[in-house]
Amino acid sequence: MASSTRAAAAPSERLLAAAAKLFPKEGIRAVGVDRVLAEAQVARASLYQAFGSKDALIAAYVDRQDEHDRANYAKAVAGLDDPADRLLALFDLARTTANRSRFRGCLYLNAATEFPDQKHPVVAAVARHRGWLRELLVTLLSEAGAHDPEPLADRIQVIYDGAVAGSKLNRSADPIDTGRALAAEILAEHTERS
């Protein structure tokens, strides 16, 4: 971002951009407030005025990433009529993201790992994303003709979670490809594709 563009952006936007740049690369807890402020080129008062605390900034960062993920998903499935194809697109997006981020892992899993206290605001932000994903899976499985979509959604979500975590551990997209194949098998066995 050019410094003139950065200066024109609101302090809250600059703080969120700094968080998006620093947190995935270095870890949320590892990046101190002073580092975020320096990257965003804002005063400490701007952080507290916009968010109230670093914890609230972290939750806002996770929520912002969730918004981006939902928008990227909507763009990826535009024009896909088959609900099974729209479901498998989740794995395709995960593969693209894993490669682009150099296998740093799922930002939601990483955030939840760094903040195990269930009362921390980031936990609620992660839960909102996971709730959207679960609802999406149930909807797509229902549209695909699954007789009992809820337990199938649970199975696919476990496969998805494992595939993304495995990708980080293996530093490879192979686990995501395997997860996609397993999800396709479930779709073939339990939907109108069978």
Image (cartoon, rainbow, N blue to C red):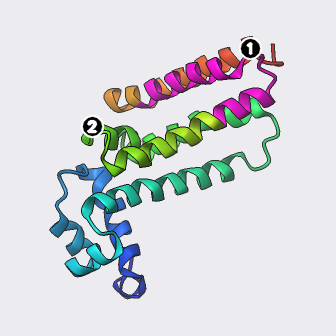
Residue occupied by mark 2: 116
- Where does the C terminus fall, quadrant-wise? top right
Where residue 16 appears, x then y in whole percent?
37, 67
* Up-down relation of residue 71 to residue 188 (above or below): below
100 or 188: nearer the viewer? 188
Mark nearer the viewer, 2 or 1: 2
Instruction: Measuring from the top left, give residue 50's x and y in whole percent.
Output: 35, 75
Label 2 and label 1: CA atoms lie apart by 35 Å
Query: Which residues lie in the magenta part?
Result: 136-164
Q: Is residue 63 left or right of residue 138?
A: left
Within 10 angstroms of label 2, few (less than 14), some, or many (20 or more) residues?
Answer: few
Q: Amino acid at mark 2?
A: Pro
Mark 1: which amino acid? Answer: His
Residue 188 place in picture, x, y as percent:
74, 15
Give residue 190's mark: 1
Residue at screen point 72% across, 17% down: 148
Residue 189, horizontal then vertical, whole percent: 73, 11
Q: Neighbour class for label 1 at 10 Å: few (<14), some, many (≥20)?
A: some
